[in-house]
Amino acid sequence: MIDYSIYSNIGSREVNEDSAGCFENGDARCFIVCDGLGGHGMGDVASSLVTECFGNELRTLPGEKEDICGFLPSAFMKAQNKLLEEQKARRASSKMKTTVAALVTDAQDAYIGHVGDSRVYIFRHNKVLKRTLDHSIPQMLVLSREIKESQIRNHPDRNIVLRVMGVEWEDPMYELMDPIALKKCQAFLLCTDGFWELIEEKEMCALLKKASSADEWLKSMAEEIRANGKGRELDNYTAVAVWNV
């Protein structure tokens, strides 16, 4: 059984360019968060459009196992093409971009894909089992061992994203994790950078251990973010918490 909750906050910004959703089709569920980029009202259009595309793709899914396995590549490409078409129609080629973090589950397995620096965390036994790796300069510096993981959140190039949807791709820019059995997973957290920047993994785990539901866990993390961000200009912050109960 899956229990989930969605949270989004505009922060200190004039427009919330984040988008999030959950879509269902039989045993299949798709959870998604997007962080729109571009400003002038276009980032929110991009994130909403991609979220809607993923939802439409799940609704038309036949439901066979091979269809679930191929869902994310198909959804990413269809959403990318739709976004490029919309840019041309609006003459806004440089103003409609978005990151994506997506989780798809069926009765047995979880499938994860992302573009940019919105993240998916997997938890087991109240600890982080795995997370997606950001497509950002600080993440690349971590991988090359030039900085530590703990330095990502405050790195001066933190906001430089190396991959997004809404730019022409020579090759697909999305990245997929290997499928993971649901029975190995306690919970998932999908979140934009405005969310994970202000709450460390140890706090996520401590609050997960105390919570009695996905909604309680998510609200307690949001409270922590507000406390940690006091006196700062807050970005939009959005997340989807998913429990495997």
Image (tube, rainbow, N blue to C red):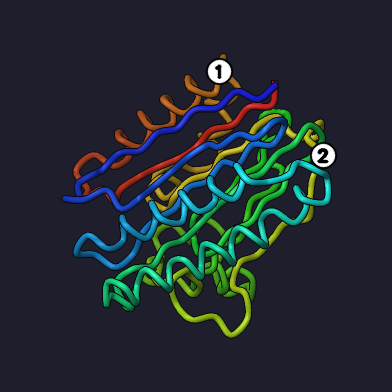
Vertical order, 169 against 82 (above or below): below
Residue lying at the far top of the rendered structure: 212
Does residue 132 appear left or right of residue 38 in this picture?
right
For the residue labelled by badge 1, is the local secondary structure a helix, a strand or a loop?
A: loop
Q: Residue at x 82, y 39 (%)?
A: 181
Task: Give the image location of residue 147, x and y in percent.
Answer: 54, 69
Which residue is more in the foreground, 84 or 47?
84
Look at label 2 and name its amino acid: Ala
Horizontal and vertical percent position of residue 142:
59, 68
Q: Residue at x 51, y 70 (%)?
A: 81
Q: Which residue is mark 1?
A: 213
Instruction: Give the labeled residue for mark 2.
Output: 181
Label 2 neighbour load within 10 Å: few <14, some 14-19, many 20+? some
- Tell me the residue at 59%/31% (across/down): 242
Q: Residues within 10 Å of mark 1 (few under 14, many from 20)?
A: some
Q: Quadrant of the N terminus?
A: top right
The Cα–Cα distance between marks 2 and 1, rounded to whole angstroms, is: 21 Å
Going from N to C along the chain, the mark reached first, 2 or 1, is 2
> Is residue 85 toward the left or the right of residue 91 in the image?
right
The structure residue drawn at horizontal position 64% and vertical position 50%, both measured from the top left corner, is 131
Residue 231 falls in image quadrant: top left
Q: Secondary structure at mark 2?
A: strand
**Tag 2 and tag 1, C-beta contact below 8 Å:** no
